[in-house]
Amino acid sequence: MKRLVVCLLCLSLLAACKKEKTQVYQSQGVLLGPDLATCQTCGGQKVQIKNDPSKNPPAFYRTNSDFGALGLPQNLTFPRNVSLDWHLDPTAMGQYGWIVITAIKTD
């Protein structure tokens, strides 16, 4: 009977333990700040991707992603090192260096 109680206690302790999930981000980068240029394909925030796997990547990408909705404070100072998940904008703006950020955290 003692063994059964000890086994049940051990099983309940193991079932109660949770592993903390750490998110692995696709890329590291730098938020450079707002793009103040006035061309038709300019604007948004400038993001430099450090380990960009793209062929002939631009010096920086632009994004209109809402950083507040992604969990970053609105009063960021620039430049800011970040880890992020991203993909090229699927609209026509993707060919002009626009990206969609799906997850981001400051380092």
Image (spheres, grey):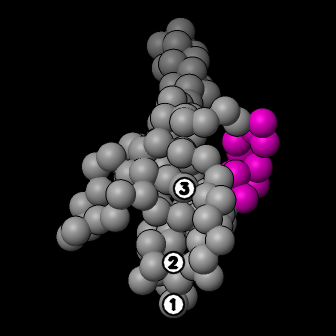
Q: Earlier in the sequence, mark 3 or mark 2?
A: 3
Give me the residue at 51% from left, 77% from top: 89
Q: Residues within 10 Å of mark 1 (few under 14, many from 20)?
A: few
Mark 2 element type: loop
Q: Position of residue 19 (x, y in %)?
A: 50, 31
Q: CA distance from mark 3 to mark 1?
A: 18 Å
Does 105 appear above or below 4? below
Give me the residue at 50% from left, 69% from top: 99
Task: Return the residue at label 3.
Answer: 46
Task: Return the residue at label 2.
Answer: 89
Identified by mark 1, the residue type is: Ala
Does 67 appear above or below 99? above
Q: Position of residue 31 (x, y in %)?
A: 54, 45
In this picture, which residue range is highlighted in magenta?
66-75
Identified by mark 3, the residue type is: Lys
Does 39 appear above or below 6? below
Give me the residue at 54% from left, 36% from top: 79
Identified by mark 2, the residue type is: Asp
Task: Return the residue at label 1.
Answer: 92
Mark 3 element type: strand
Camera-side mark, 3 or 2: 3
Q: CA distance from mark 1 to mark 2?
A: 8 Å
Instruction: Looking at the picture, tell me which residue is in the foreground, 33 or 71.
Output: 33
Q: Position of residue 101 (x, y in %)?
A: 55, 61
Q: Residues within 10 Å of mark 3 (few under 14, many from 20)?
A: many
Q: Residue furthest bottom?
A: 92
